[in-house]
Amino acid sequence: MPYRVGAEILFITFTLGTFLPHMPVGPLLDTGKFLPRTSTTSFWLGDSSWPCPDYRDVETFVNKLVRAGLLVHEPLVDAALQRQPQALSQRSLQRRFLRATGLSLRDLQSIERAHHAVRLLQQGVSVLDTVEEAGYFDQPHLTRMLKRFTGQTPAQIARVGKP
């Protein structure tokens, strides 16, 4: 996110599946959005003006967003990640997961597997053992996925991870 020098920025990180239902998540992936200002100390969200929170009152701010229905959590995200069976169609689950996270369940699982592989490589586990332990088909599969998600090859990640 571009911002001017000296700007005060407050980032709030939510658990996976927490989102603003009136704001599509997909376009926000790997970026952000500046909300319209109503004054120097407030911004527009939903149908009203909200005061800009600071680190001391961020919990109160988040709780007010929840009570106003502007911030919600999709419990199906947690259930899908834990592979719990659902009483709805696979397509409905996919749609709700995508709406809440901006990613498909398969993409998220691929990202988590790549993170696991990176941790193994950084701990000194060999590339071939990482392929097996992280559940990749073969070394080229591991390399493609790590290049896609990290921009680095397994060898590059292993080199950086060495003391």
Image: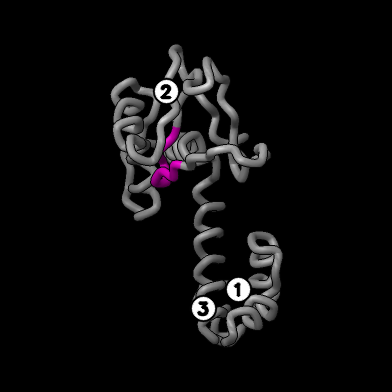
Secondary structure of the residue carrying tag 1 is loop
> Disc 1 to disc 2, how far (Cα)?
51 Å
- In the rendered image, which residue does mark 2 sit on? 51
Q: Given the current orientation, which residue lies at the most extreme front position?
A: 6
Crowding around mark 2 (Cα neighbors within 10 Å: few <14, some 14 to 19, many 20+) is some
The residue pinned by badge 3 equals 120
- Quadrant containing the C terminus in the rendered view: bottom right
**Contact (Cβ within 8 Å) of mark 1 with mark 2:** no
- Tell me what residue is drawn at x 38 percent, y 48 percent: 80
Side of 71 where 112 appears, left or right? right
Bounds of the magenta segment: 12-19
User: Mark 1 belongs to which amino acid?
Assistant: Phe
Tell me, yes or no, if residue 132 can be seen here. no
Give yes or no for residue 31 being in the magenta stretch: no
Residue marked by disc 1: 137
Going from N to C along the chain, the mark reached first, 2 or 3, is 2
Task: Tell me which residue sits at (50%, 70%) in the image.
Answer: 116
**Residue 104: % across, % down:** 54, 45
Image coordinates of residue 120 in percent, x first then y, are: 51, 78
Q: Is residue 84 above or below residue 35?
A: below
Which numbered tag is attached to residue 5? Answer: none
Mark earlier in primary sequence (1, 2): 2
